[in-house]
Amino acid sequence: MTWQLLSVLPVWVLSLAAAVLIGVASAPEQRITWVGIAFAASIVATFVIQLAIQRKEGFVVRTMAGIGGSLVILAATTAVFTVLL
């Protein structure tokens, strides 16, 4: 596994964990609100991780991968919550 993937993977895992936690712990009418908060947290986490690496090469690609992956995970979560609601 390359270091670029290792810098993006924690954000995806965070998003997936947040999606599961939202599904289990929140009321059905509050789930969409919490998904938005989880996405905001994943954006912040992406920037924190990428800036902590201190490498200019591929910064934009790694940031897009982290945020894009989180968006896909949380969009799928939103679709599941919409069907279940």
Image: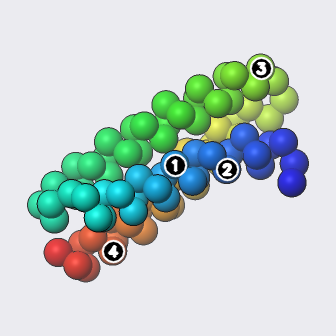
Q: Say which amino acid is labelled 4.
A: Val
Image check: 60 left or right of 42?
A: right
Report if the CB atoms under discs 3 and 1 are less than 8 Å apart: no
Picture coordinates of residue 51 (x, y %)?
Answer: 67, 22
- Measure the alpha-carbon separation of dots 4 and 3: 37 Å
Image vertical order of residue 79 relative to residue 18, above or below = below
Q: Residues within 10 Å of mark 3 (few under 14, many from 20)?
A: few
Image check: 82 left or right of 38?
A: left
Q: Earlier in the sequence, mark 3 or mark 1?
A: 1
Say which residue label 2 marks.
Answer: 9
Say which residue label 4 marks.
Answer: 80
- Measure the alpha-carbon separation of dots 1 and 2: 9 Å
Q: Secondary structure at mark 4?
A: helix
Q: Say which amino acid is labelled 2.
A: Leu
Image vertical order of residue 61 relative to residue 84, above or below = above
Q: Say which amino acid is labelled 3.
A: Gln
Q: Secondary structure at mark 1?
A: helix
- Measure the alpha-carbon separation of dots 1 and 4: 18 Å
- Measure the alpha-carbon separation of dots 3 and 2: 17 Å
Which residue does the image show at 42% across and 37% down from the upper left? 41
Q: Earlier in the sequence, mark 2 or mark 4?
A: 2
Say which residue label 3 marks.
Answer: 54
Report if the CB atoms under discs 1 and 4 are less than 8 Å apart: no
Picture coordinates of residue 33 (x, y %)?
Answer: 22, 49
Q: Earlier in the sequence, mark 4 or mark 3?
A: 3
Image check: 74 left or right of 55?
A: left
Quarter of the figure that contains the C terminus: bottom left
Say which residue label 1 marks.
Answer: 14
Which residue does the image show at 49% across and 37% down from the upper left? 43
- Measure the alpha-carbon separation of dots 3 and 1: 21 Å
